[in-house]
Amino acid sequence: MWKLHCTIITFMAAACRVVSSLDVPFTEVANATQRRAVCLDGSPAGYYYSAGSGDGARNWLIYLRGGGWCQNIDSCQSKLNQSFGSNRFLPPFRNLTGILSSNNQINPDFYNWNRIYVGYCDQSSFLGDSEFDDGQGLKLQFRGSRIFDAVVDDLLAKGMGVGENAILSGNSAGALATILHCDGFRERLPDVGRVKCLSDAGFFFRGEKVLNADYREKFFASTIVFHNISSFLPVTCTERIDPSLCLFPENLGGDIQTPLFILNKKQLITDFGAAFIKAVREISNNPSRGMFIEACFSHAVAYDERYWSPNSTIKLGNLTIQEAFANWYFDRDSITLITTANFLENCN
Ligand SMILES: *[C@@H]1O[C@H](CO)[C@@H](O)[C@H](O)[C@H]1NC(C)=O
Ligand SMILES: *[C@@H]1O[C@H](CO)[C@@H](O)[C@H](O)[C@H]1NC(C)=O
Ligand SMILES: *[C@@H]1O[C@H](CO)[C@@H](O)[C@H](O)[C@H]1NC(C)=O
Ligand SMILES: *[C@@H]1O[C@H](CO)[C@@H](O)[C@H](O)[C@H]1NC(C)=O
Ligand SMILES: *[C@@H]1O[C@H](CO)[C@@H](O)[C@H](O)[C@H]1NC(C)=O
Ligand SMILES: *[C@@H]1O[C@H](CO)[C@@H](O)[C@H](O)[C@H]1NC(C)=O
């Protein structure tokens, strides 16, 4: 199916081209600039949106893209000329894949949902609301919280609030954002029956006195200071321990109430691995949390059709990742699948 699509985007001229029905256009959030829902460089926040249809029309799946964090002037400045710091560098159209695919062979459970791929350009996991000015012409916008809120507002305006099912998901820095925003997302959807979260490669583990814990601690601590996000971190963590440790999911202390599914690569060092699994189990007090912890994963998997497909060779308890997640999401089964491997073998 082909049609003519025209867009007028503030930073591009009006553009018309023939697009395939798989092409999903980039949409700026409404009034992005006035609302200061902007990227590091001040460009408008936005997302790729594909409308739901048929029995998926009232279901919503949000996927937060990842792409690291910046934690000082140099690292933030280096993001200004890429899509991780500026939406000017996002393509005007994108084919959504994996868990966002519109192909029912690849993505049988969610292919006809409203599917949203959110650009990641704030570099602090969709947290924060401040700006940086070095007094010499370099200005950086730290508006992650405004971006997240504005995206949710836009989707509520499209009908998400009267939907039946909703999922907040994301990969890497977007997966950490998913953990941190999961309960807040649930609160914004009081009338939606089933709201759950999927964190794909977001369980960044500090551990204690092992494997460069100090390095990871300093990295997150400087991100928190540079973006001034202490007051956006979960109070249940910041009132108990030093806020500089509150980007580590292991320190959230089991406080997440909304059902959360953790997809993550297992840490393959015996002691560290055991501590990691214990921390994953403790992240939420909600008995309906789920997990699929594999050794062979690449960093993130839900958007990758090598893994998110009925043909994926990665299985635990005979279930592919998508079967495990769907069984958990639709309350067919509780899912706790953790590989027993302690070293890499037979990964392909
Ligand atoms: C955008 O701004 C216009 C003018 O200020 C206002 O009328 C409109 O309601 C706003 N829309 C949203 C979604 O905030
Ligand atoms: C982006 O800017 C940095 C300097 O901030 C420079 O080192 C890098 O080469 C630039 N990359 C591109 C793709 O222009
Ligand atoms: C999306 O996929 C279709 C079919 O393979 C292709 O024609 C189109 O160019 C792709 N669009 C983008 C933005 O990659
Ligand atoms: C899965 O593999 C079978 C057999 O090779 C193939 O016919 C089918 O198209 C594949 N499905 C997907 C979604 O790739
Ligand atoms: C940092 O955040 C606090 C609390 O949100 C705010 O009062 C303060 O003005 C912010 N500082 C900067 C430099 O943005
Ligand atoms: C997986 O399926 C095989 C073949 O159907 C069966 O023998 C095995 O017991 C199953 N394993 C699990 C963990 O369910």
Image (cartoon, helix red, strand yellow):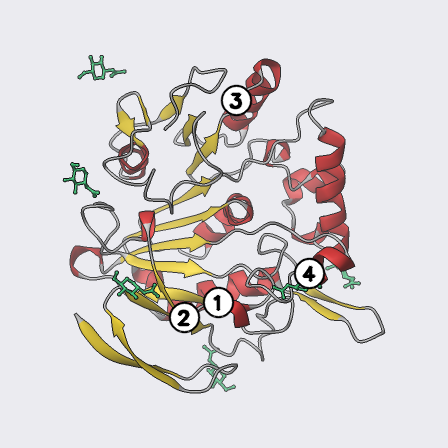
Distance of label 1 from label 2 (alpha carbons): 8 Å
Distance of label 2 from label 3 (alpha carbons): 38 Å
Query: Front-most of 158 and 247?
Result: 247
Q: Are marks 3 and 1 in contact (CB under 8 Å)?
A: no
Which residue is drawn at the image coordinates 25% and 59% (left, top)?
58
Q: Looking at the image, is mark 2 or mark 3 nearer the viewer?
A: 2
Q: Looking at the image, is mark 1 or mark 2 nearer the viewer?
A: 1
Of callouts 4 and 2, which one flags the residue occurring earlier in the amino acid sequence?
Answer: 2
Q: What residue type is disc 2 on?
A: Phe
User: Which x, y percent locates residue 84?
Assistant: 57, 60
Looking at the rendered structure, which numbered label has been put on residue 90? 1
Of callouts 2 and 3, which one flags the residue occurring earlier in the amino acid sequence?
Answer: 2
User: Looking at the image, in which quadrant does ligand 4 appear?
Assistant: top left
Q: Are marks 2 and 3 in contact (CB under 8 Å)?
A: no
Give SS at disc 2.
strand
Of callouts 4 and 1, which one flags the residue occurring earlier in the amino acid sequence?
Answer: 4
Q: What residue type is disc 3 on?
A: Ile
Q: What residue type is disc 4 on?
A: Ser
Q: What residue type is disc 1 on?
A: Leu
Q: Are marks 1 and 2 in contact (CB under 8 Å)?
A: yes
Above or below, 164 relative to 339: below
Above or below, 37 relative to 290: below
Identify residue for label 2.
Answer: 26
Looking at the rendered structure, which numbered label has been put on residue 277? 3
Distance of label 3 from label 1 (alpha carbons): 36 Å
Q: Which quarter shows the N terminus?
A: bottom left
User: Which x, y percent locates residue 30?
Assistant: 47, 76
Badge 4 crowding class, 10 Å Cα cut-off, few under 14, some 14 to 19, many 20 or more, is few
Q: Which quarter shows the C terminus?
A: top left
Label tally = 4
Dot 2 beta carbon under 8 Å from ligand 3: no
Identify residue for label 4.
Answer: 78
